[in-house]
Image (tube, helix red, strand yellow):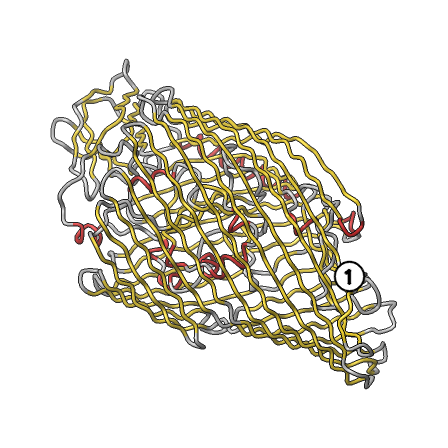
Amino acid sequence: MHLIRRVLFLLSFASAVSALWAEDSSLGNIQGVVIDEATRLPLQFVNVTLRKSGDSTAVTGQITDSAGVFAMHGVPAGEYYVTQQMIGYRPRKSPAFRISPDRLTVNLGKIALATSEIQMDEVQISAEKMLFTTSIDRKIYNVERDLTGKSGSVSELLQHVPSVQVDIDGNVSLRGSSNVMFMVNGRPSPLVNRNSSTVLEQMPANSIERIEVLTNPSAEFKPDAAAGIINIVMKKNTTAGMNGSVAGNMGDSERYNSNLSLNYNPGKYNLYGSYGIRRNNRNRTTTDDRQQADTSFAFLSQRTSGHARPLMQTASGGWDYQAGKHDQFGLSGSYFGSGVDRTENADNILSDANRTLTSSYVRNRNQDQSYKEAEVTGFYEHGFAKEEHSLRFEFTSSYAPEREDNQFTNIYRTPAISNTFDKSRLKETESNHQVSVDYANPLSETTSLKAGYSAEIQTGDFDNHIENFDAAQQVYVVDTAKTNRFRSHQITHALYSTWRQSFGKLGVLAGLRGEYVDLTSNLVTLDSSISQSYANVYPSLHLSYGVSKPVELQLSYSKRTRRPDIDDLNPFPEYSDPRNVRSGNPKLRPEYVHSLELGCQYRQGEISVTPALFYRYTYNRFTWVTRALNDSVLLTTHDNLSNDQAGGLEVNVTAGVAKVVSLHGTASVYENQIDASNLTGGRRTVNTWSSNLTMDINATETTRLQLSSNYRSSMLTAQGHMSPSYTLNAGFRQQFYNGKLSLLVTVTDIFHTMKREFTVDTATLHETAVTTFDSRVIYAGLTFRFGKAPKKSRDEQIRYDSGE
């Protein structure tokens, strides 16, 4: 309750501040939309200046948002005109108009800008994007500005993105919650969501254009993410002619990655494709010390060291065709393949309460693992005569097989007995098929409607086969107690509608989404099944209010959910480590979250400050719970907490100094209250904070240095906590031949401080585990761009920014 009262007080305080800032009702308002004359799509970041008609004196100015909209408030009576300027376009001047008591609102409608003939090499230097920008519903991180992240993986890149944290295993969380949905190019991606930590750790960062974070998405988007959405926008050029780029990076310890992208656009159609390969080298060590009560042994000390050499390949391609003035269709596909050879050595020492040694042995593991996923997407879109009035049909289908073969050897020292051998073979297959139809209609300059329907079918098949070596017969024998099979089938139907309306300074976006889910879990080994069917509605509301020229307030609410995926439901354990067993829970219930956020945008010159207050109330939240199966084996599984509350403040600051140094920093602090009384964990409260800071130094027009750091304080779990973590990275880039060739050198985790340390502390179990790996990596690479120099991809930028 203390947390709720604090958040309500902050909201009340913000409302009072906005009332004090509000303008006199006798002052005028000017609004309009800036679009591209050729594509008829909105333009973001256009400089709009209001000038007096008599002497052209500048009165005020603004930059258009992601929908191309500008709105000026508090304008005194008089005669004015508006100018629009953007690099790469011809400047435009509006006709004169008057603000008077009988005409306080002037709507200039759609203003079309035509492209100019300025040399693009000059434009690219002077119009470089900021590292971090914001729009009405999302934060945008421009990867091209991140030197230290481009040579690594997307997982490493996400460590620099505001509001995002990545742990040592590649698991991504958003404002402390791991329930994140990933989209690629504005669409949910089965490829990434199924096994995000594996895919993101292998996906090359130099194939990404930008990353968008939506902490409170509207009802237009799937609600399957209590924390929010991370949208990964891939590079895709639409410039006429043939162009592309090739990049290669070499790192220490035999690491390397490279990426090739090509694009051909002769006019009505556009062909594009890319291929990337990444070879990594991972050495990892884990220490696990635990003490158990009421067991035959009291202490376990486990030291594990492992080495993995994964090879990942990605390929994607597509074809878009403009069939006449109003119709467009396209087909695209992607492939992800990963192969890993892994060796692991686990040294186990067990002793009783008197510290007397009872058992000592080593368990060696050799693993051969492969994971593949193929995805295909097709769409047809019809545009009506009215601008932005469209109907779109789309289908997506993906298939993902995974195979894992493990061979184990147990070497016993105490007591001195013969070695034992066992092996496991795991086959997993998942498929996802989805069809959707989306309708958009701008009913007027201030009103728009969106609606849609989707149907999704998800299936999964897990076959886990365990064998033990029979020394007497000299053959492997199936272990029927551990061999199992599990299948699942889920169908989801969804309907949504959103309504956007502006009332002068006030903008409103309201939405409602209804879903029906039918889920069947089939425990094949036990010849039984569990069925669940449920329906729910998910409302959303976004409000924006232009307080003054540099200040805009935003308030948003949404209800979201997290449904168990196939791994979460599978009750059969995996036994790669007999001392630490994991399994799913077929009775796991969906979690639901009510999310409220109050934000403010302040922009003045080269300074941008974006503070936001947020509050989340979650019930049935998923949590990992560790229990003792017997005196030597721990079982970790998912269960539902009673409820969870989190609220806090996040601040993003961007500043430039004389166009030489630019800084971007993010800091968030929040209080988290967990009610785990239903799991005998009681009520727990912790204050957590995290931050990251990036500094760019533009030594010359072609030389840039970059330093980036991030810090995360301790985090609360149902039975313990995670310890703090900190990293510092550096990068250097030198361009040659008018930017066509670039040299990049990066160093990640300079001081080798990245680690994961968690503690479990209950009445019967105390455990501390620490994992480290060779995170200090040096990369050097070259990137070469060829073909016609591309302009900013306006069509792509606006389409994804608007969530279409």
Q: Identify which residue, 765 or 270, lies in the foreground.
A: 270
Total number of numbered discs in the rendering: 1
Quarter placement of the N terminus: top right
Three-letter code for the amino acid on which mark 1 is drawn: Lys
Q: Identify which residue, 118 or 363, lies in the foreground.
A: 363
Residue visible at 35% across and 20% down? 444
Where does the image place residue 782, in percent across and percent down from the top left? 30, 67
Image side of residue 65 versus residue 492, left or right? left
- Residue 692 visible: no
Where does the image place residue 645, in percent across and percent down from the top left? 64, 44
Image side of residue 293 versus residue 485, left or right? right
Image side of residue 58 versus residue 151, left or right? left
Image side of residue 295 versus residue 606, left or right? right
Where does the image place residue 28, in percent across and percent down from the top left? 30, 23
Task: Write down the quadrant of residue 324 in the picture.
Answer: top left
- Residue 655 visible: yes
Residue visible at 54% across and 49% down? 399
Q: Which residue is mark 1?
A: 482
Quarter placement of the C terminus: top left
Label 1 element class: loop
Task: Write down the quadrant of residue 481 in the picture.
Answer: bottom right
Task: Write down the quadrant of residue 587 in the picture.
Answer: top right
